[in-house]
Image (cartoon, coloured by chain):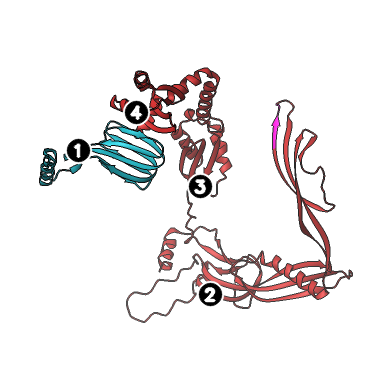
Chain colours: A cyan, B red
Amino acid sequence: MSIKDHKEQVQQTVAGLFDLPRDIALNLPKVVIIGNIQVFVENHRGIIEYAPEKVRISINRGELEIRGSQLVLRNILADEIALDGKIEAVTFRE
Amino acid sequence: MSLRSWWTYILGYVLISIQGPFPERFVNMAVARGIFLWDITRITEDKTEAKVRIDAFRAMRHLARRTRCRVRIKSKYGLPFLIIRLRRRKMLVLGGVLFCAALYLLSSFIWFIEITGTEKLDPWQIQHLAAEIGLQVGTPKWKLDLPAIEKTISDHFPQLHYVHLYFRGTKAIVEVAEKVIIPEDDQWTPAHLVAIKDGVIQEILVMVGQAQVKEGDTVKKGQVLISGRIQPDPAPAGSPPGQGPTPLPSRPEPQLVHAKGIVRARVWYQGYAEMPLVQTDEQLTGRSQTGYYLEIGNYCITLKGPDISPYPVYRTEVWRWEYQIGKPKPVTLRLLKTTFREVVIYHREHSPTQTQLLAEEQALTQIKSVLPPDSLILAQRSEVIPTNDAYLVRVKVVVEALEEIAEPQPIHQETRRTQGSQIRRKTAR
């Protein structure tokens, strides 16, 4: 068990103890999927790749891959991304 | 549209096309610098489109150089661009402004006047008065003093109880309520009951007054049926001897009362009708044509449709609209819409019996139109009048009806006040 994993363990325990929202405590993205038409990502780290069939979004520790067709970046702000189109898959990668 | 998109529209935004191999880098850097991009779409491998507000566009040039992208404006949206475009088309703006001004100006005039709530009073009279004091079609609204007009109208027509004038758009509405005039209470004025028509008395019921006729009598119109003048009995009613004061002494003069009662009489009505054996009638065939015509003075121009009737036998239905131009020698402009409907004429022959029935029916209808609503038909008799003409049937119908024929008629005579009040007390019971 590395030190980093250990740190995360402590963070999770503290978050559970004080009933904090875990996306904030652990600096994780919040992903909201509306049907198969929109994916909304909060707390991202920028776009890695953008194509109409595949979008990769950098997140804390890894990336988020969204597959679909006719994908359009409806909104992009420093901490949130709204992605429209026909969503087929949302995958987390290390 | 959300508030943010409205704001974006007001500030103006552009659709840019980003040409370069890695638009992601460009987008990430733009976001990092606080440039808001939206509707990012990849068109081809090295071409991406996005929208950006014009105030952020300038900062992007620097970014483009660093990421080796070429940024071009594809199209412009929003208010600032609209203003630039409109500056080049001043007449269009002027037209729009003029339109709004005209709309506002025209809506501040009265174009319609409506008078509601009149019952007996002719609305035209109110309109006429209103026009005299300034309320007429074409008057600007701000010139009118509503309470003053209301007051003038209600002062001028004493039968109005309430006048309310208000505007609804370009329509001035005068709402009035008429006073309900309660008929003068003639319940106590001395009156006879007289016959309103000739008849034979069937039944008579006297409530107040003195009967002048009896059942079976033939009466003429205007004859007194129940008199309001009561002649006192010549002999006073026998009073029990030796007990209390004597009853009212009989008066020498007659008492006057408001006669009341029901008098039903048999009344005869006569109706007459004639009917030919062969009747000419017409029927619409269902075929019709409509033409539009414009008449200027004596000239007639066919706008659309047939010049003359396309059918040999027809009925027309005309809708017209007229307008006169020119003050000294007016020329009438007339727009006509004429519908020609084809008819066929046919003859219908009835047997003498049938014709007689039809004639009777017609005569009966004629009687019923004058019959009072509460009358009861007792008998009806019809009679064919012989004629020389073999193709004509003449019928006389006599109807016997039972109805009330009494009507109060005031007695014009001075009556002493004390006496009147005494009677009132008596009859009120």
Residue B121 picture location, percent across and down? 55, 46
Amino acid carrying mark 4 in the image:
Val
Whether residue B111 sits left or right of residue A66 in the image: it is right
Amino acid carrying mark 3 in the image:
Gly
**Residues in magenta?**
B322-326
C-alpha span from label 4 to label 1: 23 Å
Amino acid carrying mark 2 in the image:
Leu
Whether residue B373 sits left or right of residue B314 in the image: it is left
Front-most of residues B46 and B123? B46
> Which badge, 3 or 4, comes first in the chain's sequence?
4
> Which badge, 3 or 2, comes first in the chain's sequence?
3
Q: Nearer the viewer, mark 3 or mark 4?
A: 4
Residue underneath mark 4: B27
Q: Nearer the viewer, mark 3 or mark 1?
A: 1
Q: Specify the label residue B117 is tagged with.
A: 3
Q: Chain of mark 3?
A: B
Residue B346 picture location, percent across and down? 83, 63
Q: Secondary structure at mark 4?
A: helix
Q: Nearer the viewer, mark 3 or mark 2?
A: 3
Q: Specify the label residue A27 is tagged with.
A: 1
Amino acid carrying mark 1 in the image:
Asn
Q: Nearer the viewer, mark 2 or mark 1?
A: 1
Residue B11 picture location, percent across and down? 38, 24
C-alpha span from label 2 to label 1: 107 Å
Front-most of residues A28 and B47? B47
